[in-house]
Image (tube, rainbow, N blue to C red):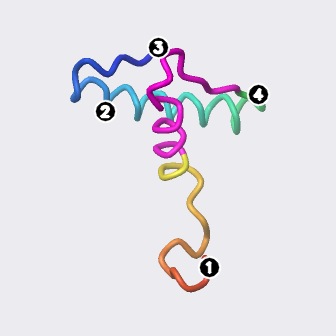
């Protein structure tokens, strides 16, 4: 569970959760459901961090190729 009451702690927890998510999906082969119990977009934030850390598009530095 990630709490967003302390911003510094929240940021650290997001990075840790993204690493755990990567381990569950790619190293252990699990299907993972990510949700936020309070509807404050924590799940979306976690997925953005996860994508940024582990799912970078091969042409991430060429914006024209991503269109």
* Residue identified by numbered label 3: 1
Determine which of the numbered discs, if any, sits on residue 49 in the image.
Answer: none
Q: Nearer the viewer, mark 4 or mark 3?
A: 3
Q: Earlier in the sequence, mark 4 or mark 3?
A: 3
Residue 57 position, x and y percent, is 60, 66
- Residue at 59% over, 31% down: 21
Determine which of the numbered discs, if any, sits on residue 11 in the image.
Answer: 2
* Residue identified by numbered label 4: 30
Q: Secondary structure at mark 2?
A: helix
- Mark 4 and mark 2: span between their CA atoms? 25 Å
Q: Nearer the viewer, mark 1 or mark 4?
A: 1
Q: Is residue 40 magenta?
A: yes
Q: Earlier in the sequence, mark 1 or mark 3?
A: 3
43, 29: nearer the viewer? 43
**Left or right: where does residue 48 sit relative to residue 24?**
left
Decide: marks 1, 3 in contact (CB < 8 A)? Answer: no
- What residue range appears in magenta? 33-50
- Residue at 62% over, 79% down: 67
- Mark 2 and mark 1: span between their CA atoms? 30 Å
Determine which of the numbered discs, if any, sits on residue 67 in the image.
Answer: 1
- Mark 3 and mark 2: span between their CA atoms? 13 Å
């Amino acid at each position: 569970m990630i709490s967003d009451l302390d911003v510094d702690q929240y940021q650290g927890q997001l990075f840790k959760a993204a690493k755990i998510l990567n381990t569950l999906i790619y190293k252990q082969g699990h299907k993972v459901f990510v949700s936020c119990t309070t509807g404050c977009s924590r799940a979306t934030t976690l997925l953005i961090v996860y994508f940024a850390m582990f799912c970078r598009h091969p042409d991430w530095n060429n914006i024209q190729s991503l269109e």
